[in-house]
Image (cartoon, rainbow, N blue to C red):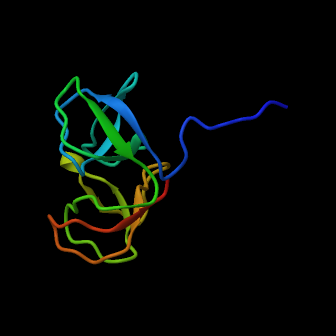
Amino acid sequence: MAEYLPLHDDGDSFTRVASASITGGQLVRVSGSNTVAPVSAASADWLGVAAFDANSGDNVTIYCGGVQRPVASGAVTAGDVLVGAASGQVTTNATPGAGQQVAIALTTVASGATVEAKFVR
């Protein structure tokens, strides 16, 4: 059997092209072939967190896995299950749909604050 190397490891970063304006720290999703855009709601096609601001057509690095710091939409309590929300933020959802769980909150924060979260991918 030949050696195998994955395209990328969990916790690593990779690059895609922005198909919309992206702000660093936003949760992004697949928006097309090799393109990403901020999430607008809970969905199974989320990828990770944008590393920096990018305009449509720019390359953007995406961090996946590990502990990330997205912005909370609504109050979050440590231990909450997080899913995507409007504007690339995350919100709580105790019973997310298949593949929609983004992370588990590690900190308690108010709406609009960054929440430390252990990503599940």
Task: Give the position of the N terminus as an image quadrant.
Answer: top right
The residue lying at 40 percent from left, 75 percent from top is 79
The residue lying at 37 percent from left, 66 percent from top is 117
Q: In this view, does 9 lie above or below 70?
A: above
Residue at the outermost right position: 1
Between 83 and 13, which is closer to the camera in this rendering? 13
Where residue 109 sits, quadrant-wise, is: bottom left
The residue lying at 27 percent from left, 67 percent from top is 115
Between 86 and 38, which is closer to the camera in this rendering? 38
Residue at the outermost front position: 3
| Residue 105 x/y as whole percent | 36, 70
Q: Is residue 117 above or below residue 121?
A: below
Where residue 94 sits, quadrant-wise, is: bottom left
The residue lying at 50 percent from left, 49 percent from top is 98
Query: In the figure, is residue 117 to the left or right of 18?
Result: right
Q: Is residue 88 above or below residue 69?
A: above
Where residue 50 sits, quadrant-wise, is: top left
Total count of labels:
0
| Residue 69 x/y as whole percent | 29, 62
| Residue 23 x/y as whole percent | 18, 44
